[in-house]
Amino acid sequence: MTDPTPTVTDPTPTDRTPTERITAALPGTSVVRIAGVGKTFGTESGGVRALEGIDLTIAQGEFVSLIGPSGCGKSTLLRLIGDLTAPTAGSIEVNGKPARRARLDRDYGMVFQAPVLMDWRTVAKNIELPLEVMGFAREERQKRSGELLKLVELEGFAGRHPWQLSGGMQQRVAIARALAFDPKLLLMDEPFGALDEMTRERMNLELMQIWQRTRTTVVFVTHSIPEAVFLSTRVVVMSARPGRIAKIVDIDLPQPRNVETREQERYFELVTEVREALRRREGGEGQLAPPDADRIRAEGLA
Amino acid sequence: MAVAAATVPRARRPTLGRRVRIALVWLAILILLVVVWDGAKWFFGDPWRIHTSFLGLPIDIEHRPPMRARIATDLSLPHIWKVVEAFIAPAQRNGPPLGLVLAGQALFTFREALIGFAVGGLLGLLLGIGFVHSRLAERAFVPYVVASQTVPILAISPLIVVATKAGWVSVAIISAYLTFFPVTIAALRGLRAADARAFELMRSYAAGKLAVLWKLRLPTSVPYLFSSLRVAAAASVIGALIGELPSGIPDGLGASLLNYNQYYSAGPERLWATIIVCSILGLAFVALVRLVETLLTRNRYRPVAGA
Ligand SMILES: Nc1ncnc2c1ncn2[C@@H]1O[C@H](COP(=O)(O)OP(=O)(O)OP(=O)(O)O)[C@@H](O)[C@H]1O
Ligand SMILES: [Mg+2]
C-alpha cells in the first residue's frame, strides 16, 4: 500500500520505453492503457498477489508479447484487459473506455491455449458463433465464415466437426472465430502452446500474415522466446511473485517478417536480450522456482 | 497446405456383423433366463405329468423334482410354457387372447406414460434451468426436490387421484412426478458442464443469459439430459402403472395387474404375463428414447471414447 501508484493522467516518464512515450503523447492511438494495475486473489490461506504495479500502454497496430515464468500473471493480465476478471488496484482502458465498456462493445477477440470449439457445431458454424450472438444476418455470417476459412486455409473443412480436425487445424478455427467480428484487439493466451514445434512455426508465419493483412492490435502470451521475438513489435518480460514488468524489449526487426527473419543477426541478438532479461530476474532475486526456469529455458531454446 | 479431406476420421457406426453379434448375445441371455427359470422348476418345483396322445401315439411323461422349494412351486413360479400359453388363451370366455388384450392396455398405459414423460421432462429441465441461474433458488428448492422423491408415491397417489378426479390426467401427474427428478439432477450438471473458457468466450462476446443458455448450456447438456431421459422413461411407465391402480381405469395395464393380483391363485401365469408386458413396455420406451438420442446426436457430438 506504500507504493505510489501512478495514475493515467500522471505517468512517470522515466521507466517508459520510446514506443510508450510516443503513444502516451498521442492518446488517440492507444488501444490498451494499463495504469498502476494490481491483482490480488483472495484465497483461504491469505491473498495471492498475482500482479503489482503494472503500467503498460499498447498502441494501435502493435503486436505485444507477454513472456515470463509460469505463474507470473500473464494470463491474469490478459484476462484483466478482456474484463474477464477485475483488477484490485489501478485502471485499465481499452479503446479509451473502461475495460468493461470495451467488452460490452465487443472490442476484442479472445484465443485460448485450447481451441474451446463447440463439438455440436461445424467448423463454419463455430466461426459464426460470435456473429450469431451479435445478431448478424445469416448471409452476412456465411459470407464472413467463408472469407475466414480461406484466411486460415481451411476451405475444405467448413462442414466438419471440431473433433475431426487436428490440433493445429482446431486452433486455426479458434483464431478465425476470434477474427470473425473484426475486433480491434486480439487477446491470445498461449495459442500455440499445445502444438509441436513445426506446426508452431508454421502457425507463427500464418499469424504474422494475418496480422499484417488485418493490422489488428495483438496482445500475445507465450512461453517461447523465439516465438515472441519473431512475432512482436515489443516483448514485455515479466517476473513472478508478485507479477511485475521486468523489462520491455523493443523488437526492431524489419517488416514484413518471414522465414528469413529467423536467420538474421539482429533476431539472435534480440532473442538473447529477452533471455537475459528473463534470466536476470531469476538470478538476481532468486524468486523463480527451478522448474519454472527450466521450462522457460527448454521452451525458449528449443 | 490443403489436407486431403478423406484423411479425416469419420464417426464410427456399428457394422452389420456387430449388430448381429449384439442380437445373438441378447438372445443367449434370454435363453439363459428361460433355462434358469425352468431349471429351478425342474429341480425344486412341483411334480408334473403329461398324459396325452400326439398323432395317434400315446405320450406319457412324468417328472418328479428331487427337491422342493417354495419359490419354485407352480403357484409362485409358473412354467414358462404356461405363461406363453396364457398369452394365447382368451382373457375372458370367448374373448380375444390375453396377449392382444395386454397389448392394447400397454398402448393405453404408454400414452399416459408419454404424457407424464413429456410434462415431467419439461418440468425437470425448466427447474434445472431455473436453479442454474439462481443460487438462491437452488439452495432453497433442491432439498425439496430431493424430498419429493423420498415421499412414498404409493401413499400419495390415491391423494392425487382424488384431488384431480380419477382419469388419465391424474395418472400423467403421478408419472410426471417420478419423471422430473432425474432430469432436474442431470440438467443441474449438464447446464454447468461446459468448459469454463467457453463461458468466458461467451462473456467476451457480451452474450446475454439467453444466448449463453441457448448456444452453450443447452447444447452441452444434451448428452446428460438423454442419459436422464432414459431413466425417466422407465420411471414414467412405473408412475403410470402406480397411478392407474387407485384410479380404477380399466383400459391400462394397471387394471390387469390389479385383477390378476386379486385372482392370483386362480392363474398365476396371467399375472406373470402382465408383468412381462409391463417390462417390455418399459424397455421399448427406453429404446425409443435411445433411438431419438442417436438420431439427434449422431455426427453432432464427439463419439464417446470407450464406447
Ligand atoms: N482464480 C484464481 N484464484 C486464485 N489464484 C489465482 C487465480 N488465477 C490465478 N491465480 C494465481 O495468480 C498467479 C498468476 O496466475 P496466471 O495464471 O496469470 O499465471 P501465468 O503467468 O499465466 O502462468 P502460466 O504461464 O503457467 O500460464 C498464480 O500464482 C496463480 O496461482
Ligand atoms: Mg497462463
Image (cartoon, rainbow, N blue to C red):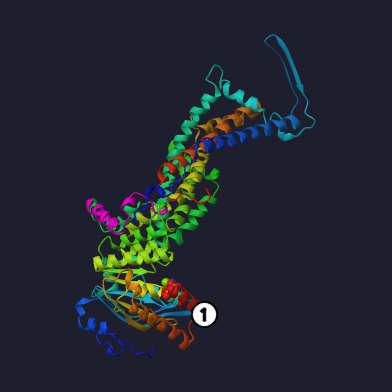
Q: Is residue A5 placed above or below B238 in the rendered structure?
A: below
Provide the residue designation for mark 1: A290
Ligand 2 found in image quarter? bottom left
The answer to which of B70 and A203 lies nearer the viewer is: A203
The residue drawn where x is 39% and y is 81% is A272
Tell me, yes or no, if residue A86 can be seen here.
no
Q: Is residue B189 placed above or below A257 in the rendered structure?
A: above
Task: State the SS at label 1.
Answer: helix
Which of the 4 image quadrants contains residue A177?
A: bottom left
The range drawn in magenta is: A139-163
Q: Is residue A93 magenta?
A: no
Query: How many residues crowd around disc 1 within 10 Å: few (fewer than 14), some, or many (20 or more)?
Result: few
Tell me, yes or no, if residue B176 can be seen here.
yes
Tally of marks: 1
Q: Position of residue A79 (x, y in %)?
A: 36, 71
The answer to which of A107 and B149 lies nearer the viewer is: A107
